[in-house]
Image: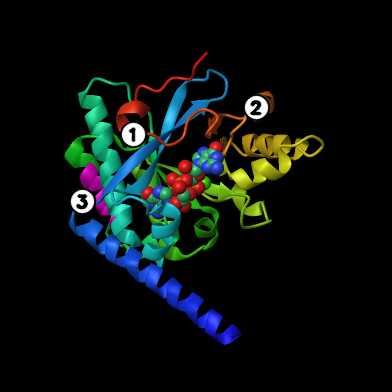
Amino acid sequence: NGAFLYGDEMKEKVRQENHIKAKLMEAFENDGFFMVYQPQIDAKTKKVNGYEALVRMKEQGIYPGQFIPVAERSGWIWRIGRITTELAIKQLAAWRDEGHELHPVSVNFSSNQLNDHGYIDFVQDVLDRYKVPAHFLEIEITEGLFLEKSALADEIFKRFKSMGIRLLMDDFGTGYSSLGYLTYIPVDVIKLDKSLVDTYLVDGKDSFIRNIIHLMHDLGKEMIIEGVEEKWQFERLQEFGADTIQGYYFSKPIPAADAIVFKVKE
Ligand code: C2E
Ligand code: CA
Ligand code: CA
């Protein structure tokens, strides 16, 4: 029995994976992706100071948590990387042309995108084409990639920096326990992961979060706190000197037209 059950589960997994693969293929051919933008809020002024661009499929019912891992496994993530980067830059240009004041937009860079050797030239090319200054684009890179210490990764980070593109470390606190590397990696902003906020921003444990914020400031890094859902969390983080807050308490990721006029309600 057990063997049968296991077999069925495996079959279902394979079926689901193939289904998503097929939908991804369709989406690549038919302009099947769009971006939503989650406002990032300055903790002191409560004004928007940036956005994270997050990809969605136009096909209903398939979420990033499902299709991003499939794209990673099938070697297609580089295509998503290019599509999302171009959509975000295009959006910056559109906002500018509509007369809006711009704030930086960050896009996610997956570790498997390291194999996309043409990516940096592509970014430069798209920035030039839309005449968007490089400092409005930021790249979110997960902790693991910074620690890889490969020549390829170093080269990519150097080139981003020389273009004037800031690097953000995504999901800080989910992977590694050593903090020593923070002194030498070329990262400007640290994004504290929601799981740490959930675990430690509670009575009796929250000095840990305060200490991380102070440590990062001592190292000259800015801190974005992710996954803030409650008012009391925001207030506590404000007290601790956090720079920027990103979370449902202020806003979910929203369409571009709403994001650009988003304001925190007083
Ligand atoms: P991530 O890069 O850590 O993105 C943050 C995720 O947390 C987003 O989910 C966002 O909607 C969610 N989030 C933000 N604030 C809150 C909050 O207060 N509470 C809760 N519960 N969630 C919050 P999303 O958009 O579903 O994306 C999930 C993951 O999929 C992302 O995690 C990222 O790893 C990946 N992803 C999304 N868009 C892209 C993309 O364009 N490129 C790549 N490579 N990966 C992407
Ligand atoms: Ca991210
Ligand atoms: Ca994150």
Please give the range of residues in magenta. Answer: 119-126
* Residue in the picture at 55% in, 80% down: 5
The residue type indicated by label 2 comes to: Gly
Figure quadrant of residue 237: top right
Real-space Cα separation, disc 2 to disc 3, in angstroms: 42 Å
Q: Looking at the image, tell me whether mark 3 or mark 1 is earlier in sequence order.
A: 3
Taking the magenta stretch, the answer to whether it contains residue 12 is no
Real-space Cα separation, disc 1 to disc 2, in angstroms: 30 Å
- Above or below: residue 95 compared with residue 134: above
Quickly name the residue at label 1.
255
Nearer-the-camera pick, 17 or 156: 17
Question: Residue 246 in the image: x percent, y percent?
Answer: 52, 34
Question: Residue 171 in the image: x percent, y percent?
Answer: 55, 49
The residue type indicated by label 1 comes to: Pro
Quickly name the residue at label 3.
31
- Mark 3 close to ligand 1, CB under 8 Å: no
User: Residue 241 bears which disc, if any?
Assistant: 2
Mark 1 or mark 2, which is nearer to you?
Answer: 1
* Residue in the picture at 59% in, 86% down: 1
User: Residue 111 bears which disc, if any?
Assistant: none
Q: Looking at the image, tell me whether mark 1 or mark 2 is earlier in sequence order.
A: 2
Residue 87 lies left or right of residue 214; in this view the side is: left
